[in-house]
């Protein structure tokens, strides 16, 4: 299959060039499109009236601009508590469990058999 690669590629390139040549020949053989119809003439716009003169701008600016006024007194703050509420007199008591679970002291040496890991039983 690898030996056929360059041959197939050469055939595809030749086919593409032949197809391009046929397309170019077809474009050369066709007649030019008919002349486009003349565009309609655009009527001229009527002349606009001349702009009137703007009123003259003031030559002097006001010397002082109005300044914003600040409030003379600050708003009052809401009443905040000055101390924390008292803590409870004693710590809460937590009941102790009545019995503790037994902790094994030895590690078991016999493990349960897992069927698919154990060898088949001997007959």
Image: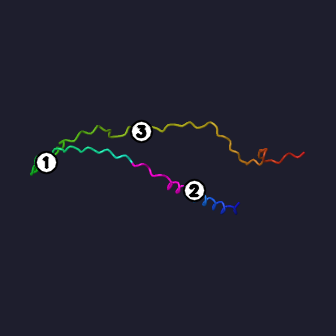
Residue position for label 1:
65
Residue at coordinates 13% horizontally, 45% vertically from top-left? 52
Other-residue count near label 1 (Cα within 10 Å), few / some / many at <14 / 14–19 / ≥20 = few
* Front: mark 2 or 3: 2
In this rendering, the answer to whether 84 lies above or below 8 is above
Query: Quick one: 120 or 33, which is closer to the camera?
Result: 33
Magenta stretch, residue numbers: 23-35
Residue 109 left/right relative to 15: right
Query: Quick one: 75 or 5, which is closer to the camera?
Result: 5
Say the numbered circle drawn on residue 87. Answer: 3
Residue 113 left/right relative to 67: right
- Give yes or no for residue 25 being in the magenta stretch: yes
Residue position for label 2:
19
Percent from the top left, x then y, of residue 87? 42, 38
Q: Quadrant of the N terminus?
A: bottom right
* Front: mark 3 or 1: 1
Residue at coordinates 86% horizontally, 45% vertically from top-left? 121
Percent from the top left, x then y, of residue 80? 31, 39
Residue 17 left/right relative to 105: left
Query: Quick one: 18 or 76, which is closer to the camera?
Result: 18
Percent from the top left, x then y, of residue 42? 28, 45
Name the N-terminal-most of marks 2 and 1. 2
* Residue 21 placement: quadrant: bottom right
């Amino acid at each position: 299959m690898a030996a056929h690669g360059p041959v197939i590629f050469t055939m595809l390139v030749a086919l593409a060039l032949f197809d391009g040549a046929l397309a170019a020949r077809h474009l050369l053989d066709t007649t030019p499109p008919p002349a486009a119809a003349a565009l309609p003439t655009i009527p001229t716009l009527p002349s606009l009236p001349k702009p009137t003169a703007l009123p003259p701008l003031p030559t002097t600016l006001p010397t002082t601009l109005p300044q914003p006024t600040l409030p003379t007194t600050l708003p009052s703050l809401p009443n905040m508590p000055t101390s924390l509420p008292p803590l409870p007199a004693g710590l809460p008591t937590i009941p102790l469990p009545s019995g503790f679970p037994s902790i094994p002291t030895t590690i078991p040496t016999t493990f349960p058999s897992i069927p698919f890991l154990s060898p088949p039983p001997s007959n």
